[in-house]
Amino acid sequence: MSIMELNGGSVIAMVGKDCVAIASDLRLGNQALGLSSNFQRIFPVTDRIYVGLPGLGTDVHTLWEKFRFRVNMYTIKEEREIEPETFAHLVSSTLYEHRFGPYFIEPVIAGLAKTPSGGVKPFIAATDLIGCLNFAKDFVVAGTASSKLFGMAEGLWEPDLEPEDLFETISQALMNAVDRDAYSGWGCVVHVITKDKIVTRTLKGRMD
Amino acid sequence: MPDMNSLAHPQQHQFNPYTENGGTILAIAGEDFTVIAGDTRQSEGYSIQTRYAPKVFRLTDKAVLAVNGFAADGNMFVKKVRQRLEWYRHAHAKDMPLRAIARLIQTMLYARRFFPFYVYNILGGIEEDGSGAVYSFDPVGSYEREACRAAGAAQSLVQPFLDNQIYFKNQTPAQDTSHPVHLPLHSVLALVIDSFTGATERHIEVGDGLEMYVVLARGNPALQSLQDLPGAEEVTGTQAEERVFVIRRDLKKD
């Protein structure tokens, strides 16, 4: 019995043209038994950063509260909002603190970074359960359907997708991947982050 | 010098007759053609044994078999199937029909139920009614006719992509339209190449080369375009009405 596969669940994030998207399924289970079809594992960090926490269900909540606390402390001390890359390093060091008794979570981060010229730059990252960072330029995946997500994203993703096309791409990648994974599925949620708005959609998928 | 301390304890040895040799195979059936493809890398653990070991074999002019798993078992299994097909030819003066080959493969696999050929088989070709067909098997002979199937090391990467692009899963057709039941040959070939380049990118056991066998039914209008396709080689055995081609492409070698 693998702790990483006890509760199931998968997350994917993708880069588009001046936008990013992050999406997850909504299943929480106990091995083969489904418990909830509305388990949110993606959380807003700031107006422009979202984090997805696939892995052990109990650690989803503990870790998110830990991140929330540390981001609040950062905001108060620095008197400014945290940047996505800084947040990624915060995630990494928080996980590495527990190097020899880790939280069983593989976080996925998606956000828009501010550029000196006042524009935005898409940012995505993922780490393993002890905080090894992966700054990918295209897409990152994590969770029980990760191999299926890699196959889907490798086939569907292309550079410079507009927000609506990015939404379609990430949704198709996620839905078709979780349909081949027994531990993921039971509905999906997709967030598309652009400069002036965030669009959140809940998708109806196969419920088997 | 052997460690005397360890010799004091009983030693257990076990012979494992199986190895996993990596690689991936894939087949897609069209209305009047079938594409059967496989990469050509053969590996054992992290070592590459060879960059060119075919996994896809022409059995007759209307049947192509792809084998994946334990390479030694795969090669021996193809050899035995070919021998049975030759006996059939001598007895009946014709090639065995595809659905009969599929049933033959099931009985040959199940005959080894308690010492199986460690091989996943995908059989592709043309049925007697002229339709494209794909049969997929598990190592002990459980089988099914399908429109498409991926197997092997990158099955988990490729199969959901095929669900989406061949069966149009999770896609809703526009108002008053419907999804095509069968795709044309050029779209299928493009999807096969995309599947393998994607799998090569993310899976260490997939790469080096790609072999795509195309079996055309009699009178298939795509014949001319295949004959003109650079790098497509005709491998039809006799003066049969079905035509078999093989298309080779390079995949990344890292």
Image (cartoon, coloured by chain):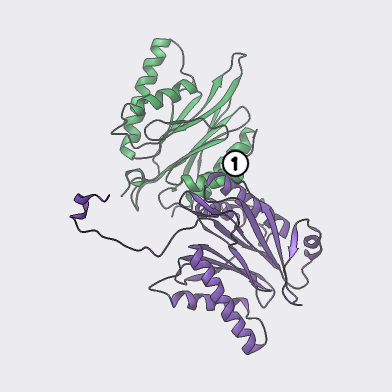
Chain colours: A green, B purple
Could you tell me which chain the residue with mark 1 belongs to? A
Q: Is residue B102 something that shows in the picture? A: no
Q: Name the residue under label 1.
A: A168
Question: From the viewer's perspective, is A57 left or right of A133?
Answer: left
Above or below residue B157? Residue A115 is: above
Q: Residue at x 50, y 65 (%)?
A: B72
Above or below for A157 versus B88 = above
Numbered marks: total? 1
Res. A165 image quadrant: top right
Please give the name of the residue rendered at 46% of the width and 12% of the height, measured from the top-left corner.
A80
Tag 1: residue type?
Glu
Residue B226 appears in view? yes
The image quadrant of residue B169 is bottom right
Compared with A122, B91 (above or below) is: below
The residue that appears at 70% across and 59% down in the rendered structure is B247
Residue B44 in the figure: left or right of residue B209: left
Residue at the bottom extreme, as displayed: B91
Residue that protrudes farthest toward the front in the picture = B1
Estimate the x, y position of residue B12 in percent, counting from the top left: 26, 60
Q: In which quarter of the image is the C terminus of chain A?
A: bottom left
